[in-house]
Image (tube, rainbow, N blue to C red):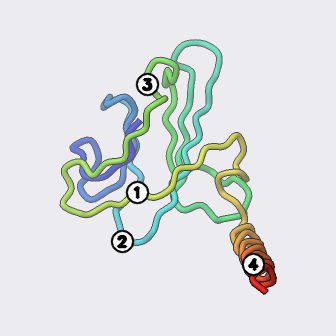
């Protein structure tokens, strides 16, 4: 599975997803921009051969319910296309692309958490740091 920009398979200046380097399995994910983008990809394994589905979202609302996908590929055989590998690339595009974080999960909420979750984790981390510094300071006396 390849998520990238600038391939001959994607319109110029667009993000795209391609499965197994196969032009039959390409999704256009919209124009590139200089913003931070969140891509969510759901792989749906179904019984039978070539009955699997790939759903992609771009910048879904954090903490919201699972919306309709931006793009969907049907009739994919995910067991035989090497989905165990993920490539992030800037194929033939002149634009710079930086890839940051990859999350895997079994539910929408695990990969697209509520914005407040980040705040709670940050506050919890600061409290632990403060407690650790305070204990460390007392230990030095």
Instruction: Give the mark toward the camera: 2 or 1.
Output: 1
- Sequence-wise, which precedes: disc 2 or disc 1? 2
Quarter of the C terminus within the rendering: bottom right
Q: Position of residue 112 (x, y in %)?
A: 66, 57
Instruction: Give the mark toward the camera: 4 or 1.
Output: 4
- Sequence-wise, which precedes: disc 4 or disc 3? 3
Q: Position of residue 35 (x, y in %)?
A: 42, 71
Q: Position of residue 88 (x, y in %)?
A: 37, 47
Residue under the point 18% across and 60% down: 94
Looking at the rendered structure, the secondary structure element under dot 1 is: loop
Q: Quadrant of residue 61?
A: bottom right
Quarter of the N terminus within the rendering: top left
Looking at the rendered structure, the secondary structure element under dot 3 is: loop
Q: Is residue 80 above or below residue 72?
A: above
Residue where numbered disc 2 is placed: 34
Residue where numbered disc 1 is placed: 99
Real-space Cα separation, disc 3 to disc 2, in angstroms? 30 Å
Q: Quadrant of residue 106?
A: top right
- Sequence-wise, which precedes: disc 4 or disc 1? 1
- Sequence-wise, which precedes: disc 4 or disc 2? 2
- Sequence-wise, which precedes: disc 3 or disc 2? 2
Real-space Cα separation, disc 4 to disc 2, in angstroms? 43 Å
Residue where numbered disc 3 is placed: 82
């Amino acid at each position: 599975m390849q998520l990238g920009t600038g391939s001959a398979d994607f319109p110029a200046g667009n993000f795209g997803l391609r499965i197994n380097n196969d032009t039959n399995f390409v999704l256009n994910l919209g124009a590139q921009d200089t913003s931070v983008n969140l891509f969510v990809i759901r792989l749906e394994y179904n019984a039978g051969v070539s009955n699997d589905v790939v759903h992609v979202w771009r910048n879904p609302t954090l903490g919201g319910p699972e919306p309709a996908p931006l793009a969907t590929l049907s009739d994919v055989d995910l067991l035989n296309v090497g989905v165990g590998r993920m490539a992030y690339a800037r194929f033939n595009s002149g634009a710079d692309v930086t890839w940051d974080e990859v999350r895997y999960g079994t539910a929408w909420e695990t990969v697209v958490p509520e914005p407040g979750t980040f705040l709670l984790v940050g506050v919890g981390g600061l409290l632990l740091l403060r407690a650790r510094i305070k204990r460390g300071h007392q230990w030095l006396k």
